[in-house]
Amino acid sequence: MPKESVIARSKKKPKYSSRIVRRCFRCGRKRGYMRDFNLCRICFREMATNQEIPGVKKASW
């Protein structure tokens, strides 16, 4: 978990658009981020397994 100050800094509008850091809204992780869901891969997997994301189901074949 990142510090609260790091999360707060990422929410501010940066001076240049290339400096945008997108973070997971649940845990604040910046790596493995999915824009479509605003989640990191770990939180996405947890929520998909628990059926908390509508329309997403874990694949099994």
Image (cartoon, grey):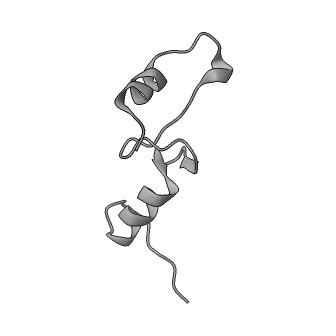
The correct choice, above or below, for 54 with respect to 57 in the image is: above
Residue at the right extreme, as displayed: 18
The correct choice, above or below, for 41 with respect to 16 in the image is: below
Q: Where does the N terminus fall, quadrant-wise?
A: top left
Residue at the top extreme, as displayed: 15
The correct choice, above or below, for 41 with respect to 25 in the image is: below
- Residue 35 is left or right of residue 53, and the answer is right
- Residue 13 is left or right of residue 55, and the answer is right
* Residue at the (54%, 43%) spot, across then down: 35
Residue at the bottom extreme, as displayed: 61
The correct choice, above or below, for 27 with respect to 46 in the image is: above
Q: Where does the C terminus fall, quadrant-wise?
A: bottom right
Instruction: Point out residue 31 in the picture as x, y percentages from the top left corner.
Output: 57, 46
- Residue 35 is left or right of residue 55, and the answer is right
* Residue at the (44%, 72%) spot, across then down: 57
Instruction: Point out residue 3 in the picture as x, y percentages from the top left corner.
Output: 39, 33
Instruction: Point out residue 30 in the picture as x, y percentages from the top left corner.
Output: 53, 41
Residue 18 image-quadrant placement: top right
* Residue at the (38%, 71%) spot, across then down: 49
Number of numbered callouts drawn: 0
Residue 6 image-quadrant placement: top left
* Residue at the (44%, 23%) spot, across then down: 11
